[in-house]
Amino acid sequence: MPVKAIKPGYHGEFRDRVENFRGQQLLNICWEKHTMFGWPMCIPVPPEMPFGALLEQVLPGIYGAHPDFARIKWNEVQWSSAKGPFTPDPSKSMVEHGFKHKTQIRFRTPGLDGHNGAG
Amino acid sequence: MSNIQPVFIALQANNDTLPIIEAICSDNPQAQVNEYPAMVKINCPGRMVIRRSSVEERMGRDFDLRELQINLISLAGEVDESEDEFVLFWKA
Amino acid sequence: MAADGDLKPIKKLSLKENYALLTRGLGWEPTYEKKEEIFRTIDFEGIKIHDWEKWEDPFRLTMDAYWKYQGEKERKLYAIIDAFQQNNGQFNVTDARYVQALKLFLNGIVGLEYASHRGFNILGREFPGVGPRIAAQMQAIDELRHATTQIHAISHYNRFFEGMADFPHQFDRVWYLSIPKSFFEDAVSSGPFEFIVAISFAFEYVLTNLAFMPWMSGAAFNGDMSTVSFGFSAQSDEARHMTLGIEVIKFLLEQDPDNVPLVQKWIDKWFWRGYRLLALLATMMDYMLPKRVMSWSEAWTIYYEENGGALFADLARYGIRPPKYADVTIKEKQRVSHEMWSIFYSVRNAVGFPVWLPSAEEMDWFSEKYPDTFDRYYRPRFEHWRELEEKGTPFTNMTLPQLCQVCQWPCIYTEPDDPTEFVHRETEYQGETFHFCSDGCKDIFCNEPEKYVHAWLPVHQIYQGNCFPEGADPTAPDFNPLVAALQYMGIKPGVDGGLMSQHVDASRWEQWTSRPANLHEGAITQAVRKTT
Ligand SMILES: [Fe+2]
Ligand SMILES: [Fe+2]
């Protein structure tokens, strides 16, 4: 059911179109089960940034404080998005992985399910 | 499910409401009084009536049921108000 | 006088006659303007009203009585506020943590009273029926009274504590305060019928008891005579507003069967919107009252499950069912306050009040009140965080959240059936991705994407560079966008947020009262030790 409005044809502007982000795009990242961090993270990234940079330069800053983080075996991590599981390639960029503006990616680390079972 | 769903009224706990609460209890034998800090909440299945005459008797003065507004905190149920009675009820 | 002996005194009008004269008697049919020209927003939502005369205002409050009783409420309220201030009541509350809840109240809730005042002014103009118009006008005045008395009462605290001085600024700009702000803006930018169903029914009738009854009773329990007085004074109007809410619903449903699905859709939407808003309050009740009257979970059981159950049983005769996703609220009642406090703690440097970890006593209380969740999911987390605090490296999250496009909460919520899994809900609309905290919010978006695509989401605005103070230079080498965003919001790093044990409110409290700032954890300054 479309919105009912006083003026026919009403449509709000897309306030978060990628053009508004000065050459960057938003990426949402969620470490599954690690609810201690409270929420999936939202960060701006250059579309051409390689996945490897995300792993090496971005994730430690976000999640490094968690006791599980240092124990992650990165080759065993299960990656997925709303479209289903995917296997990242560290040398390929965000765009080459098919990540659009505001894509959410999730990673699951089986066996590392949160500190003492509490996120 | 007829007429057993609870209605309630919550009043500030103060000297003005003591006689009102007493009147409610005597006019509604099924009323159940819950005391909380600064607040009294009275539940009653189906229907609850506040009678002006019962309040006046206990207050020892004329009472306009609209004075309830001053110390009312909340209520649940449909309301029917006249000069003589303030009634809370559910139809179902 | 004796000469007039045979003159009968004029019969006093009954309440019903009096009210009929005020409403029906003072209304008129326009003759030189078309009705459609006068009431231009009454049709577009699709609600059908055949006879406005069928409107019944159960309270039948006439203007003379309205002013008389409102005046009396004000006199009573100000007598208490005066006494509170003259007696330095701000130092008689349980401890300095309690005051932090007032900051949330002032910065986040008072603005809603004012927004509500504006909304009901609009209804007072837009409704063709005299009865509902008068009720809306009275409510508009009430809401303004709520805003002013709350500001006035809390202004006294502002003389002694940080974080309250810029409440309108914070309401407009602070990231988590976009949650209450956008809630009301959503309502006020809908049509008049949706607004009144949203605010008078779904919010005031179904949900505000949770806000004002246990929380205000809690304020009393913590010694805050001032807050409980303005709270109950406002709530005495609220009882009238709630009755307006149920009257509106009955009126709409009885006017035309075609109204039923519209009303149901609004009930579903606004129950969910209101419920998400109340998560803030769940946290205030469970974590910010040093002495507690009841838990959020108990309050939800009494005020939603029991009273809401009675209400929806009553409305079933119209074909109305309980709000969609009410079952999710019941599943979430065991965790929502814990999830919320966890995020406030971990982003404490970006919030407008200091936070703390629950004490051992408080955790025991949680174990008792939340037997299915607390010991399993939250106690180990808080114990881990306490260890880190003791080591001098308290847990901190420095990264901004993915926000829900509708309620604007960060996507903090977990699956209804599994508190260890984050909720992931998204949709694509015209090529763009949108994220939601829940099925409830996703449904709301999908029903009206045209409206929600232009939500002002603080995180995205910060990243777009729209939340910097005037004169900031984002190209400067030492420019820190997060620090600049906090300045823009009116949050002073090192003053407003952080840990309670290091906060200036805490040390001043001990200096001024010689009592510990956190009654469970002992003093943090010499000011208390030397007296004991
Ligand atoms: Fe209000
Ligand atoms: Fe949401």
Image: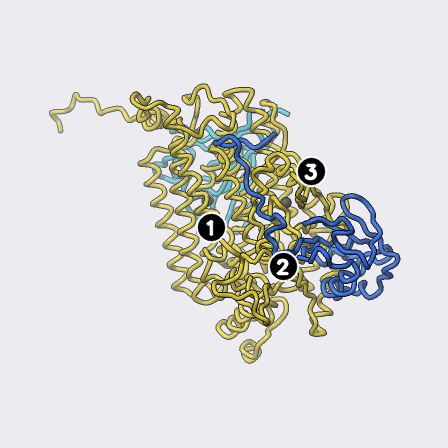
Q: Is mark 1 within 8 Å of ligand 1?
A: no
Chain corresponding to blue in the figure: A
Distance from Cα at disc 3 to Cα at disc 2: 26 Å
Other residues around mark 1 within 10 Å, as few (<14) / some (14–19) / many (≥20): many
Chain corresponding to yellow in the figure: C
Distance from Cα at disc 1 to Cα at disc 3: 30 Å
Q: Which residue is rendered at x = 77% and y = 47% of the image?
A: A81
Residue labelled with disc 3: C327
Residue labelled with disc 1: C111
- Reading the chain from its start, which is encountered first: label 2 or label 1? 1
Q: Which residue is rendered at x = 78% and y = 65% of the image?
A: A56
Is any part of residue B53 visible from this angle?
no
Task: Say whether mark 2 and mark 3 are on the same chain.
Answer: yes
- Reading the chain from its start, which is encountered first: label 3 or label 2? 3
Q: Colour of chain B?
A: cyan
Other residues around mark 2 within 10 Å, as few (<14) / some (14–19) / many (≥20): many
